[in-house]
Structure formats: structure tokens, C-alpha cells
Image (cartoon, grey):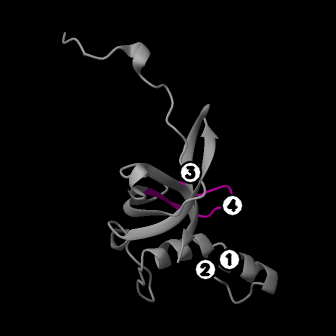
Amino acid sequence: MPKIPVNPSHLPTEETPMDETLTYVAFVRSLVLAENPDKNGLYFLKAKHEVTEPDDYRGKSVMDNYIPIPAEVDPDMDARTRQRVMESGVRLGKLLASAKVSGADDGFETEEVIGKEVRFTIRNEEFNGRMIPRVKDYLL
């Protein structure tokens, strides 16, 4: 078995949290439809972005694990329900606008978003005892 030339006591055990005050530029590396709907019955997308700017964070991955796909607006919905359904698409709308993807009247293909450049802010969230960067908001 090969010997790895690294002293384990010299290795970091946590990554440094990303700066929450910066704007990040990244490429969308994946956009996947979740297998199961959320507790409200809505399906959602999960995105993985690879940071290109600022240089200090180049190559870092930032996830967005909950981008709801809005339900269709039903003409029989009351005004409050219609507004709530339409607003559930804000995050997806901002992602697509940031990526400059317009799609078509009948929708868009997730492949149209892969490789597109997006801009966003982040927040560091604790997950299983460590800080993970997540997309806070997509910028237009």
C-alpha cells in the first residue's frame, strides 16, 4: 500500500467560510430536478455553481438546494392563492434572468442553464457541524 506524503496533523479540518459581503460570479455546473416534491407538493430544482470571481474563491462550489418550480395558476384560485403561487417562482425567475435564459412559452430545458454565468450573494449555513456556502440571492 502506498504511503501518502502528508502529515495528518498539518491538515485543516474545516474550510474557511466564504465572504458574505461579496458578489460572486459563477458558472452553473448542474441543475437537477429533485426526485420527490417538497412538503407542499411542489417539485424543485437543485443547482451547483462553480465560482470564477472573485479570484480568492475561484473553483469553490456553491449549492442552491431549493429552487421551487411554481404550480400552474388556476383561474378558480382566489387572489391571495394566485399571488402566493406566482411568487413561489421568484427564485427560479431570478436564476434564469441572471443566467440570461429566456426559454419558450412551454418552458425551458435544464440543459439550457448549464454552463451559463450567474451572479449571486451567499450566506454561510451550518450543516452537520460545519459552515457551507449557499446561494442567498441571484442578481440580475
Q: Main secondary structure of the magenta part?
A: loop
Q: CA distance from mark 2 to mark 3?
A: 37 Å
Q: Are dots 3 and 4 in contact, CB under 8 Å?
A: no
Image position, residue 126 (x, y; %): 63, 39
Per the rendered image, the range of residues in magenta is 36-48
- Which percent across, then down, holds residue 96? 47, 75
Q: Is residue 108 above or below residue 125?
A: below
Query: Is residue 42 inside the magenta stretch?
Result: yes
User: In x, y percent, where is residue 123?
Assistant: 61, 53
- Tell whether 52 sits left or right of 22: left
Q: Which residue is mark 2?
A: 72
Secondary structure type for disc 3: loop
Q: CA distance from mark 3 to mark 1?
A: 29 Å
Callouts 1 and 4 close, C-beta under 8 Å: no
Which amino acid, mark 4?
Asn
Q: Residue at x 60, y 47 (%)?
A: 124
Residue topped by disc 3: 19
Relative vertical location of residue 61 with respect to residue 94 in this rendering, above or below: above
Nearer to me, 114 or 77:
114
Circle 4 sits on which residue? 40
Disc 1 or 4, which lies upstream in sequence?
Answer: 4
Q: CA distance from mark 4 to mark 2?
A: 14 Å
Tell which of 36 and 92 is nearer to you: 92
- Give x and y (percent) for residue 72: 61, 80
| Nearer to us in this view, 52 or 80 | 52
